[in-house]
Amino acid sequence: MKDKVVIITGGSSGIGKALAFEFGRNGSKLLITGRNKHDLDEAVNELRQDGIEVTGFNADVSNEEDNKRMAQEAIRLYGTIDILINNAGISMRSSFEDVQLDVVKKVMDINFYGAVYATHYCLPEIIKNKGSIVGISSIAGFRGLPGRTGYSASKFALNGFLEVLRTEYLHRGVHVLTACPGFTATNIRMRALLADGQEQKESPRKEDKEMTPQECARHIYRATVKRKHILILTFEGKLAVFLNKWWPWLADEVVFKYMAKEANAPIR
């Protein structure tokens, strides 16, 4: 990854920020994006203090024009784009019967269309360089999670999108990785949207028991270097995917009981 130009959407916190450190420490040149300029500037400063070459780009991934300008800025600064990591994402937590539908749309606009827009504008350079497109999906993209309707739907859509790209560019040297973390200790659950669109503020899970963003980033980095196609992380995640494939009726029961144990679970 030395001297490779890497774009990371949502690179100012969580897995995105950990990925920036992982790729940066291995010699990559970075452009990271974020909606919150204060958080973005802080992340850039931390990365530069670690000797990493990085530029911050204030952007809303759900805005098509922002993605176009992001790709143009990376090319202006570094001359090309080798790797795009579609990391920006948001979650939600509500039963489907209670959720306001604009919440589902907002999640879909960020998690799915954000990746579509970013990939579209970075693709010509990635094709030219036989580079990589990485999508940070989720176990929820293989197995629907009750109380996470919009989130699971957006990740299923992302998985399908990445699968199509992997097949379309199979003989053109483009690498496509679908990376599916399990529950990871980031702020995504604190910022998850409730039924009315307000942020949850508190995590319903024991964050200290989850995989760290740094560990997650190391797995994704190695999978990118090895040009793997699919990465499924955590024992729980692998079990959920396995059960859903071979015994979907059993997966329904297991997943319902597991998710119902969360504090203030929206399912009943």
Image (spheres, grey):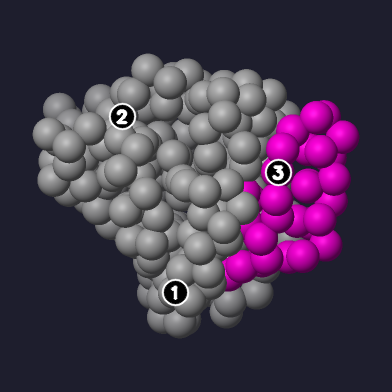
Q: Which residue is mark 2?
A: 230
SS state under label 1 = helix
Q: Residue at x 17, y 37 (%)?
A: 172
Residue 58 in sight in this render = yes
SS state under label 2 = strand
Q: Is residue 67 magenta?
A: no
Instruction: Report crowding for label 2: few under 14, some 14 to 19, many 20 or more residues within 10 A (C-alpha).
Output: some
Name the residue type under label 3. Answer: Val
Q: Tell me the quarter of the picture where residue 157 sits.
A: bottom left
Q: Is residue 173 left or right of residue 240?
A: left
Q: Residue at x 52, y 24 (%)?
A: 1
Where is residue 13? Give x, y as percent: 70, 47
Q: Nearer the viewer, mark 2 or mark 3?
A: 3
Q: Is residue 41 left or right of residue 169?
A: right
Tell me the tag on residue 64.
1
Q: Which residue is mark 3?
A: 54
SS state under label 3 = strand
Name the residue type under label 1. Answer: Glu
Q: Earlier in the sequence, mark 3 or mark 1?
A: 3
Placement of 214 over or under 44, stated as above or below: above
Tell me the tag on residue 174.
none
Q: Nearer the viewer, mark 1 or mark 2?
A: 1
Q: Residue at x 28, y 29 (%)?
A: 229
Q: Earlier in the sequence, mark 2 or mark 3?
A: 3
Q: Is residue 38 magenta?
A: yes
Name the residue type under label 2. Answer: Ile
Where is residue 102? Give x, y as percent: 45, 82
Magenta span of residues: 31-60
Q: CA distance from mark 3 to mark 1?
A: 23 Å
Q: CA distance from mark 2 to mark 3?
A: 27 Å
Where is residue 221? Give x, y as percent: 51, 25
